[in-house]
Amino acid sequence: MSLILLAFGLVMIFEGLVYALAPSLLERMLETLRQMPEAAVRQIGFLVIVGGLIFVWIAFQIGV
């Protein structure tokens, strides 16, 4: 359970950094996403999920 809380905490820190340090960049990224076709956004989402799964797998391989 503590590992899940750690993971959520780290995600919240990184998300918060984007909002705090680069809000204009975030606005431009959101505008770009609005202009992209839904299929492309969905594909990017799946690629991010796969990347996250790879990172989790690597973390468990090195002994989290």
Image (cartoon, helix red, strand yellow):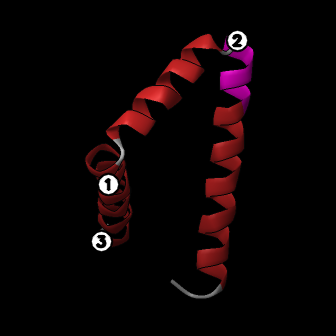
Q: Nearer the viewer, mark 1 or mark 3?
A: 1
Measuring from the top left, give residue 46's x and y in whole percent: 69, 36
On the image, numbered disc 2 is attached to which residue?
A: 37
Which comes sooner in the sequence, label 1 or label 2?
1
Q: Residue 11 sits in which quadrant?
A: bottom left
Say which residue appears at 62% left-offset and 12% top-offset: 35
Instruction: Report helix, strand or loop for mark 1.
Output: helix
On the image, numbered disc 1 is attached to which residue?
A: 17
Position of residue 36 in the picture relative to residue 14 (left or right): right
CA–CA distance between discs 1 and 2? Answer: 27 Å
Instruction: Tell me the tag on residue 51.
Output: none
Measuring from the top left, give residue 33's x and y in whole percent: 58, 21
Q: Amino acid at mark 3?
A: Ser
Magenta extent: 38-43
Please tell me which residue lies in front, 30 or 4.
30
In the picture as drawn, the residue positioned furthest to the bottom comes out as 63
On the image, numbered disc 3 is attached to which residue?
A: 2
Instruction: Report helix, strand or loop for mark 2.
Output: loop
Position of residue 27 in the picture relative to residue 52 (left or right): left
Determine crowd level at label 3: few under 14, some 14-19, many 20+ residues with C-alpha closer than 10 A.
few
In the picture as drawn, the residue positioned furthest to the front comes out as 24
